[in-house]
Image (spheres, grey):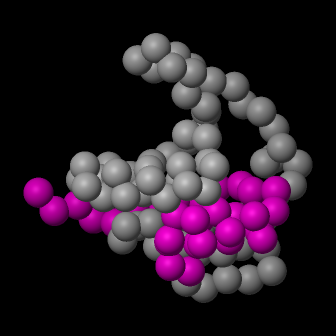
Amino acid sequence: MSLRPFHLAFPVHDLDAARAFYGELLGCPEGRSAPEWIDFDLYGHQIVAHLVPAKASDDSGANAVDGHDVPVPHFGVVLAMDDWQKLADRLGAAGTRF
């Protein structure tokens, strides 16, 4: 099965923090950027962090999924187990709670 890439724009309160997390920690290559947004390549999909301080600080809550509170909104990518383990190891070594 071949999937087409998607584009997702999401609010952030700090572009430097977004660049550090998505670019440096997750390893998403950075594409175009402007003072208010940054494009990242998330495993072939384009995600765009947009600076929106008031919206990004809004806690929209969570819903129970498989016995865990999952924050809303959220997004992710489905990885092969080896790729997931490498990413999980990198996140754990950085002290990221997930």
Which residue appears at 53% of the width and 49% of the height? 92
The answer to if 39 sits in the magenta stretch is: no
The part of the image, by quadrant, that contains residue 45 is bottom left
The part of the image, by quadrant, that contains residue 42 is bottom left
Q: Where, quadrant-wise, is the C terminus in this rendering?
A: top right
* Badge count: 0
Q: Is any atom of residue 46 visible in this view?
A: no
Which residue appears at 34% of the width and 51% of the height? 85
- Percent from the top left, x then y, of residue 81? 25, 49
- Percent from the top left, x then y, of residue 56? 78, 48
Between 87 and 14, the one nearer to me in the picture: 87
Direction from residue 65 to residue 60 in the image, left or right: right
> Quick check: 64 above or below 88?
above
Give the residues in magenta: 1-30
The answer to if 4 sits in the magenta stretch is: yes
Which residue appears at 71% of the width and 55% of the height? 11
Which residue appears at 58% of the width and 65% of the height? 25
Q: Where, quadrant-wise, is the N terminus in this rendering?
A: bottom left
> Quick check: 97 above or below 43?
above
- Percent from the top left, x then y, of residue 50? 72, 64
Q: Residue furthest left?
A: 1
- Percent from the top left, x then y, of residue 6? 40, 62
